Amino acid sequence: EILFARLEPDRKSAYVQEPFGPILSVYSRQDVQIADTINLQGMPETGLPDLKWQEIEPAREVVNGSVFSIRRFSARTRAVSSGIFEFSPVATVQVVIPNQRNRQRDPFFSSFFDQIETRPVNLPVEKTVLEIKSLPENGRPGSFNGAVGNFSFETSARPLRVSAGEPATLT
């Protein structure tokens, strides 16, 4: 293999509305150059808000005796419903094709005038499963409405002293 991709969640299960983050890693052998654009298709279409992918620090790894460059992307999301989510995406990368015709040309001008040619390559990603659990029923207060997390609020009132019937602003 000279190109492949992996998708790994940061955990195997999460609760509804609990943040989690998948990481997409695109491996390319060092002698293969890929263009900047990577397209990911086949992610679950319901139950997850839009995933906003951000490229994180690249890495290198030896796999089966070959050195691979790894471009990594992470996203943070929260599931809005419980269930089993299966991720079976396909990552499409643009492989840079070396320009064979211009190898004999003047090195100064060939780098300036050459166009980069790319070809799309689809990289199927092994299926990844993530279980999203409903929030536990046990121990919920009667007034529970689904909010999960740590919350803090700041308020202020002006003026601080008022007589009955005078307006006050609470922010």
Image (tube, rainbow, N blue to C red):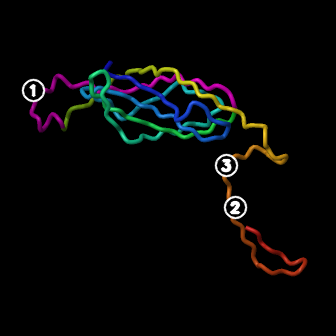
Left or right: residue 17 versus residue 68 is right
Counting other residues with Cα less than 10 Å from the Cα at mark 2, is it few (<14), some (14-19), or many (20 or more)? few
Q: Amino acid at mark 3?
A: Gly
Residue 58: image location, x then y, percent: 35, 38
User: What number is the disc on residue 149?
Assistant: 3
- Does the rendering let one see residue 73? yes
> What residue do we see at 21% from left, 25% from top?
99
> What residue do we see at 61% from left, 32% from top?
13
Q: Amino acid at mark 2?
A: Phe
Viewer-nearest of discs 1 and 3: 3
User: Residue 92 colored magenta?
Assistant: yes
> Which residue, given by chain and number where applicable, does mark 2 sit on?
153
**In the rendered structure, which disc, 1 or 3, sits on the residue that comes first in sequence?**
1
> What residue do we see at 27% from left, 22% from top?
65
Relative depth, front residue between 13 and 74: 13
Question: SS for tag 3?
Answer: loop
Using the numbered discs, state the Cα–Cα distance from disc 2 to disc 1 in whole angstroms: 69 Å
Counting other residues with Cα less than 10 Å from the Cα at mark 1, is it few (<14), some (14-19), or many (20 or more)? few
Relative depth, front residue between 31 and 132: 132
Residue 1: image location, x then y, percent: 33, 18
> Which residue, given by chain and number where applicable, does mark 1 sit on?
104
Residue 171: image location, x then y, percent: 73, 67
Relative depth, front residue between 71 and 46: 71
